[in-house]
Amino acid sequence: MKRNVLLNPGPATTSDTVKTAQVVPDICPRESEFGNILKQIQKDLARIVCGNAEEYTSVLFCGSGTICMDVCLNSLLPENKKIFIINNGAYSERAAEICKYYNLPLIEMKVPLDERPKLAGIEEILQKNPDVYLVYATHNETGTGLLNPIREIGALAHKYNCVFAVDTTSTYAMLPIDLEKDNIDFCMSSAQKGLMAMTGLSFVIGKTKLIEESKSYPKRSYYCNLYLQYEYFLKTGQMHFTPPVQTIYAAKQAIEEIFRDGIEQKYARHRKVHEAIQNGLKELGFKEFVKKELQAGLIASAIYPDDKNWDFEKVHDYCYERGFTIYPGKVSNINTFRLCSFGAIDVYDIKDFFAVFKDALKHCNVSIPVKYNEEAK
Ligand SMILES: *Cc1c(COP(=O)(O)O)cnc(C)c1O
């Protein structure tokens, strides 16, 4: 099979064994053979982010990653309580938008996209708003690659008796996460990102006790309710509605491969790939949007050079035709493109990519090293 190197922020490059794991005899997902696979996946998903399987559980959903944001926000808010979102990127902005669609009482702390939130500011908001129940942040703001200090935010949330939910969609199984140590009550991800599997299976991992408590909270969605999905699985061992059957076979294979190869090795590989990407960008003179020390180490956001010949689409197409996919950024006032180190790729792929990327720049007559006007950062 042709192998493409995807440097976009998911879906990520998958192994051939994960791709072919989807080709299985037809099966009705209500059979116990399939139920056993779901149960194993449910356990394994929690195992990746917590040692204590007694206290935490995972709940599976059929959909892309956004379904888990929707589920957590609409399901975990008791009556007369507020959500507090720390908003410093496109994904926390999406979370705020979800709250607005459900008319959920929301406090937003807006922070510039290339900055971490100030903990004192978070504490002040929590102090002044005792009716906040759910604190929500994004671990790695995928639009820029900025890492938020979730452990510290979680400690503050707990100090003020709040529940802390984190969007870990773009860090799960790529950066070490420990729900207990990181003070996270709920996290989430989607099979096409850190698991290096297929789109269509997403999951929330959280404290069982808190899910049980949410039974009495207002039900704001029929399809996307955390407690209903949790309870149905507990009672029947099946997902409430038709699961993405073949996608689940791929996820099973991907999880087996992660445990087989070692998760620590996986973290190290993502880090090395990211470093190779940063070095490649630096050699060509590209500037990054987020300071190195604030990055999650999984996404490089490069600023467009000030060169009249620079044309992202042309460079993209040149690379795409040669098996490499690059992706635009998500920053409204400044043009960036992203190179992500999510999938089953290694340092040699990045070397091959930069050979092609450099050819693309030459092909477009962009000067190398690339140029920036004085005022650009
Ligand atoms: C990818 C991603 C999502 C989900 O996006 P989908 O397109 O719905 O899969 C949510 N949050 C973050 C931080 C992400 O990176």
Image (cartoon, helix red, strand yellow):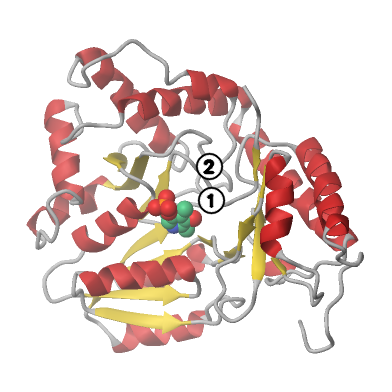
Whether residue 75 is situated above or below residue 29 in the rendered picture: below
Direction from residue 186 to residue 214 in the image, left or right: left
Direction from residue 198 to residue 132 in the image, left or right: left
Which amino acid type is marked by label 2? Gly
Whether residue 267 is situated above or below residue 30 in the rendered picture: below
Q: Which mark is residue 152?
A: none
> Label 2 near label 1: C-beta < 8 Å?
yes
User: Splitting the image into four quadrants, where does ligand 1 fall?
Assistant: bottom left
Residue placed under numbered mark 2 in the picture: 194
First reached walking from the N terminus: tag 1 or tag 2 = 1
The residue nearer to you, when weighing 84 against 87, is 87
Which residue in the rendered view is the most extreme toward the top?
25
Whether residue 113 is situated above or below residue 300 in the rendered picture: below
Q: In x, y percent, where is residue 43? A: 36, 30
Q: Is residue 112 visible?
A: yes
Residue placed under numbered mark 1 in the picture: 171
* Mark 1 Cβ and ligand 1 under 8 Å apart: no
Q: In x, y percent, where is residue 27? A: 26, 14
Q: In x, y percent, where is residue 328? A: 61, 62
Direction from residue 88 to residue 36 in the image, left or right: left
Query: Dot 2: within a 10 Å radius of its alpha carbon, few (fewer than 14), some, or many (20 or more) residues?
Result: many
**Quadrant in which residue 311 is drawn:** bottom right
Q: CA distance from mark 1 to mark 2?
A: 7 Å
Q: Residue at x 50, y 79 (%)?
A: 119
* Mark 2 Cβ and ligand 1 under 8 Å apart: no
Quarter placement of the C terminus: bottom right
Q: Residue at x 18, y 75 (%)?
A: 103
